[in-house]
Image (cartoon, grey):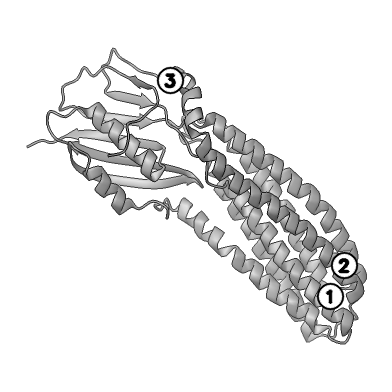
């Protein structure tokens, strides 16, 4: 059995008969945590935009002088990256807005829409560059300056490699601290969370409101998208370097510049597919792949006093924010509050689901 929940609980008096239904709402104890994540995401995105503006300017000028479509392809992808980062900055800002009566889950899912728009930009630009490469293949291409093309691509590769290391380090760092400080935060904000709960004792509402500890291990979906952008650009830079070196050594092999444009444009498109799958999964409110819903139901059914669990739904509000709702039929003479706390403890400790809504129903024979 999972260990008991360690947070401070605010429990409303149970004045209704045991046959009444009891609802349980677990509020995220992550307002401060989310704000910190948004701040870090914003810093990373601004940093990426600053570096990419410099690299893009260098590649546009160098690509025109070298007459290299491969270099201009890389510059065009950087332009879409900058546009994507701008969208991500906007969505990260909007995702921090407070909940409203019409947006009860807040605005976190706008991050997903922003990531989708960013991927669409990649597809549009890549499609155009593939078309342009085919056009140049069908018509005679003018001379390409490989000696200039190679150092420009090398410069872009170095910058992209640095950005990949920076973003990758941020992801690992998030994992480490998400575990080491989870307990600490779980206590530091208990009073703050409880202060905002509306417990109506006069109506005898069977409501239990508790705080929850949140492991902030998942990479923000916009930072994950930015990571894919940078990885794609680094791959592209390698291709341009190879093409530049070949054309530098063999100036007559101009076709290499176009072939590299085609190959690496397709590779860039392929790098977006996993992200696209994740986006559609969230928008379709599919069960997150990291949650074994069959095992979860089995574990819930095995809790002492639980007769059956039905209408079990698990979905992601956005990347790293999972919610659960279910109906639990309990046996007679069972403490509903105890069952609810066990359900919450199980969901948090084993499945890392921190937004839990469970409705208790009596077993009517």
| 197 displayed left or right of 201 | right
Query: Count of labels shown?
Result: 3
Q: Is residue 273 visible?
A: yes
Residue 44 x %, y %: 70, 44
The residue that mark 1 highlights is 244
| Quarter of the picture holding the N terminus | top left
Asked if 347 appears above or below 211 in the picture, the reply is below
Q: Secondary structure at mark 1?
A: helix
Residue 268 located left or right of residue 206: right
Question: Relative to residue 155, is residue 106 drawn left or right?
Answer: left
Between 342 and 114, the one nearer to me in the picture: 342
Q: Is residue 35 left or right of residue 42?
A: left
Q: Position of residue 213 (x, y in %)?
A: 45, 33
Q: Position of residue 239 (x, y in %)?
A: 75, 72
Marks 2 and 3 sit apart, C-alpha to C-alpha, by 59 Å
- Of the numbered discs 2 and 3, the one sitting upstream in the chain is 2
Label 1–label 3 contact, CB within 8 A: no
Marks 2 & 1, CB-CB < 8 Å contact: yes
Residue at 77% across, 79% down:
258
- Label 3 crowd (10 A; few <14 / some 14-19 / many >=20): some
Disc 2 to disc 1, C-alpha distance:
8 Å
Q: Which residue is found at the position 28% from the left and 32% from the top?
A: 340
Which residue is disc 3 drawn over? 194
Residue at image location 53% in from the left, 39% down from the top = 178
For mark 3, give the secondary structure. Answer: helix
Quarter assignment of residue 158: bottom right
**Vertically, is 51 above or below 2?**
below
Residue marked by disc 2: 151
């Amino acid at each position: 059995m999972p260990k008991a929940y360690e947070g401070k609980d605010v429990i409303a008096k149970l004045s209704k008969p045991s046959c009444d239904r009891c609802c349980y709402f677990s509020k995220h104890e992550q307002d401060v945590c989310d704000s910190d994540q948004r701040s870090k995401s914003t810093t990373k995105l601004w940093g990426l935009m600053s570096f990419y503006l410099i690299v893009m300017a260098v590649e546009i000028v160098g690509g025109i002088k070298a007459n290299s479509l491969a270099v201009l392809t890389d510059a065009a992808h950087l332009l879409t990256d900058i546009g994507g980062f701008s969208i991500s900055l906007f969505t990260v800002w909007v995702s921090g807005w407070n909940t409203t009566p019409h947006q009860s889950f807040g605005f976190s899912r706008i991050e997903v829409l922003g990531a989708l728009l960013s991927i669409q930009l990649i597809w549009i630009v890549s499609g155009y560059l593939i078309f342009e490469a085919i056009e140049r293949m069908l018509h005679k291409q003018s001379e390409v300056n490989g000696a200039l093309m190679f150092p420009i691509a090398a410069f872009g590769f170095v910058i992209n490699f640095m950005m990949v290391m920076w973003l990758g380090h941020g992801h690992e760092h998030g994992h480490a601290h998400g575990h080491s400080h989870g307990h600490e935060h779980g206590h530091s904000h208990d009073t703050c969370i409880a202060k905002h709960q509306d417990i109506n004792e006069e109506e005898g509402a069977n409501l239990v409101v508790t705080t929850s500890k949140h492991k902030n291990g998942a990479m923000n979906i916009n930072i994950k998208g930015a990571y894919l952008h940078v990885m794609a650009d680094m791959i592209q830079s390698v291709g341009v370097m190879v093409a530049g070196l070949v054309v530098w050594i063999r100036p007559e092999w101009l076709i290499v510049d176009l072939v590299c444009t085609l190959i690496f444009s397709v590779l860039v498109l392929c790098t977006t597919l996993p992200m696209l799958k994740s986006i559609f999964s969230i928008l379709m409110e599919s069960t997150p792949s990291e949650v074994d819903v069959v095992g979860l139901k089995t574990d819930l059914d095995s809790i002492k006093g639980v007769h059956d669990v039905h209408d079990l739904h698990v979905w992601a509000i956005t990347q790293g924010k999972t919610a659960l709702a279910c109906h639990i039929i309990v046996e007679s003479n069972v403490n509903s509050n105890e069952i609810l706390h066990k359900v919450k403890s199980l969901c948090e400790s084993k499945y890392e689901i921190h937004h839990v809504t469970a409705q208790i129903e009596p077993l009517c024979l």
